Amino acid sequence: MKRIALFASGSGTNVENIALYFKNNSNVEIASVLTNNPNAFVLNRAEKLKIPSLVFSKSDFKETSIVVDYLKEKRVDFIVLAGFLWLIPTSLLKEFAGRIINIHPALLPKYGGKGMYGMNVHKSVVENQETESGITIHLVSEKYDEGEIVFQAKCAVEPDDTAEDVANKVHKLEYEHFPKIIEQLL
């Protein structure tokens, strides 16, 4: 049995999609949902799905072992960042070396780095008249969006696409591929 912790900062659509994907899988359990945002809708999704959750502060995350201790207590094997916006501290990277992945809503190395998330990415893709975008699933490192790339999937960006159109195409790729890639990595 592999136990996954899902980290998110916002709505949690990917968290819900992943949880539902593994719901009837006897080899995988979603051990917990963790968030840095006490008002994140992901907490409602976790409650509805009967998944334990933890809310933590920046100081809890960066300056204490609260999060690492919690993950150990939950016997977590693998961490998935699904719309989590903070840089991962070294202590967590060391404890879960090679076992933390992130999904990014663009084809890295383009449109990565601090502040490049959500609609910021899609607006940049449209403004730069890119002909394609997509998703990148990568291992997490000390720097935003620079870990080893595990998987990419592409979608076309049409000349008349808005940032919202690109977001919708990218979300479809996330929902289709992210759970399957997690399963393969496990």
Image (cartoon, grey):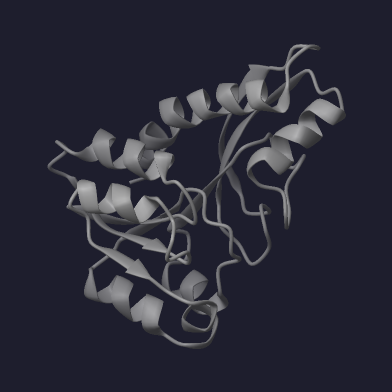
Report the label total: 0
Does residue 33 show up? yes
Q: Position of residue 166 (x, y in %)?
A: 66, 24
Residue at 38% over, 51% down: 42
Front one among 32 and 168: 168
128 left or right of 101? right
167 left or right of 73? right
Q: Position of residue 15 (x, y in %)?
A: 37, 45
Farthest residue in the front direction?
39
Q: Is residue 20 above or below residue 98?
A: above
Front one among 128 and 39: 39
Residue at 73% over, 47% down: 112
Front one among 2 and 119: 119
Q: Is residue 104 above or below residue 79?
A: above
Q: Position of residue 50 (x, y in %)?
A: 17, 52
Does residue 29 show up? no
Residue at 41% over, 85% down: 65
Farthest residue in the right direction?
128
Q: Is residue 161 above or below residue 127?
A: above
Q: Which quadrant of the structure image shows residue 17? A: top left
Residue at 48% over, 51% down: 10
Q: Position of residue 167 (x, y in %)?
A: 61, 28
